[in-house]
Amino acid sequence: MPEPRWSSSELLAELGRFETELRRAGLRDHTVGTYVGRAETFIIWLRGEYTPRGADRALDAPAENPERSLGVSILEDLRTNISRSDITRYLAQYAAVTGYDGSLRRMLQITGGAVDLETEAHRVAVIDWLRAWGCRHLRRTDTHRTAETLRTWWEQWSERLPGEHTTLTK
C-alpha cells in the first residue's frame, strides 16, 4: 500500500488542527509555539519559501555596501523578502514561545510605561523582562549586582542615547 502524500497546504491545515488540539488540551502558549512554530518553518522550507540565513549572512551586508548600516540592510531585506502577515505571524509565534508579551506587560505595569533606570524597582523590572526575553546570562542570584551595574551604565550613557522619538532608521 503506497504511503499517503500530502500537499504543503494540507500539511499546514493539519498543523492548524494540531495547534487547536494542543490548546484544547490546555498546553501552555510556550509549548504550543514550540511544537507548531518549528513544524511550520519546516513546511515553509519544503515549499521553497524559506532559506536559512544565519547570523553570518546579515553581518556580511555592510561589506557589500559600506555606506549602508547593518540596521538599514536588515530592514531592506525584511521589506523585500518577507510579507507583513509573515512578520505578524512570526512575532506572534515568538511571543508564544518566549512569553514576551506577558513579561513586557509586567514591566510596563511596574514602570507605569516610562522606565526610569535610576529607580531600583524599574531596573529590576527591566532585568526580569530581559530574562524572560532569553538573556540567560543574567543570573537570578545576581539581581542586585546586575541592577547596580545597570544603574552605573545608565549614569554613564543615558545622555548619549537617541531620544524617545528617534526612528529606528535614524
Image (cartoon, rainbow, N blue to C red):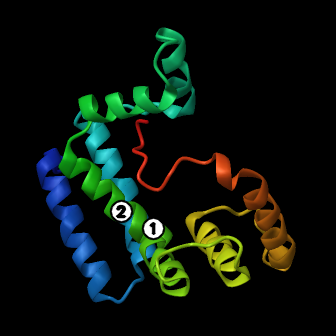
Point 17% across, 46% down: residue: 8
Q: Is residue 109 left or right of residue 85?
A: right
Q: Is residue 157 left or right of residue 169?
A: right
Q: Is residue 126 left or right of residue 167?
A: right
**Three-letter amino acid code at the position of disc 2:** Gln
Mark 2 Cα within 10 Å, few/some/many (few <14, many 20+)?
Answer: many
Q: Nearer the viewer, residue 4 or 13?
A: 13
Q: Position of residue 141 (x, y in %)?
A: 85, 79
Point 49% across, 83% down: residue: 112
Q: Nearer the viewer, residue 23 or 161?
A: 161
The residue under label 1 is 97
Q: Position of residue 152 (x, y in %)?
A: 82, 62
Q: What's the mark number on residue 13?
A: none
Q: Position of residue 120 (x, y in %)?
A: 73, 81
Q: Nearer the viewer, residue 6 or 36?
A: 36
In the depicted structure, whether residue 167 falls above or below residue 93: above
In the depicted structure, whether residue 13 falls above or below residue 96: above
> Quarter holding the C terminus?
top left
Tag 2–tag 1 contact (CB < 8 Å):
yes
Point 42% across, 26% down: residue: 73
* Quadrant in the picture for residue 147: bottom right
Circle 2 SS class = helix
**Three-letter amino acid code at the position of disc 1:** Val
The residue under label 2 is 93
Tell me if I can see residue 6 in this picture. Answer: no
Mark 1 Cα within 10 Å, few/some/many (few <14, many 20+)?
Answer: many
